[in-house]
Amino acid sequence: MRILVISDVHANLTALEEVLADAGEVDGVWCLGDLVGYGPDPNECIERIRRLPNLTCVLGNHDAAVLGRLEFEVFNQDARSALQWTQETLSEASWRFLKSLPERVVIGEVTLVHGSPRQPVWEYLLDLQTVHDNFRFFDTPFCFVGHTHLPTIFHRGALDIFPFAGYLPPNQAIQLTPREIVNPGSVGQPRDRDPRAAYALYDTETRVFEHRRVTYDIAAVQERMRKARLPLRHIERLSLGW
Ligand code: ZN
């Protein structure tokens, strides 16, 4: 099956639409959380995502915060005001959809979580020691994560050796080999200094994973963010990709 893997859409409908158009026909969609927060289109993004074919979606930390399950205090000031705005803007239907999302899903050979297999909603996989420890917290050959907004692959061999970490090059098909933790990057707010929307295509039969980048109309999103009076820092960072 050809699967579209998306994460950290963060209420950026323009980026999401470009990703969906670029991906073309797929058999299913795996969404790794953080549908809202930062961006100006929370309801539109949720509405679009929930109608995608064969959707499997997990809960992110921003989604959890909007639902009142995480204290706003754990976020920085700008993220907090964006969350506040999102909470006020969210429709009843959007709220219900977010509330229905599980924190962790196992689908075939892959475990899906937002942050890490140990702490699905909150933990960041940014250093090798943390990654190493996390391999004990899932049983499937692969685990797909989001949360850092960095397209990365962590490989662990048969022995208890330190994981190998690599940046996923765009538009290059990679053959996954057990066991690996893979991050497709962020659709709505990339942080690897490449402002293009990031996503991946995954073939469940061949285990080929392709990280892709696509340009979108960043200025249009920034304009909507300005109108919504969202934090300036979040508006500016979209053009820089961090
Ligand atoms: Zn995020």
Image (cartoon, grey):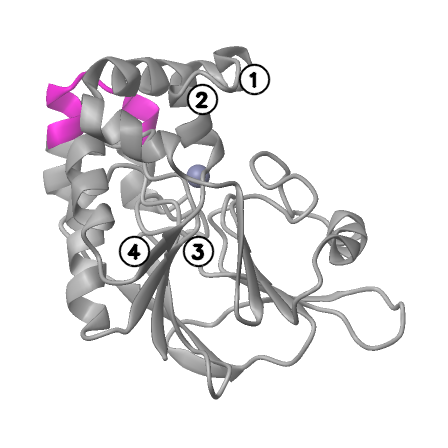
Residue wearing tag 2? 65
Q: CA distance from mark 3 to mark 4?
A: 8 Å
Q: Earlier in the sequence, mark 3 or mark 1?
A: 1
**Mark 3 touches mark 2? (CB < 8 Å):** no
Residue wearing tag 3? 185
Residue wearing tag 1? 74
Mark nearer the viewer, 3 or 2: 2
Residue sitting at x 68%, y 77%: 178
Q: Earlier in the sequence, mark 3 or mark 4?
A: 3
Mark number, residue 197: 4
In the rendered view, does 51 fall on the left or right side of 55? left
- 169 over 52 or under it: above or below: below
Q: CA distance from mark 3 to mark 1?
A: 22 Å
Query: Can I make out residue 184 in this image?
Result: yes
Under circle 4, the secondary element is strand
Label 3 CA crowd tier, 10 Å (few <14, some 14–19, many 20+):
many
The residue range painted magenta reads: 224-234
Q: Earlier in the sequence, mark 2 or mark 4?
A: 2
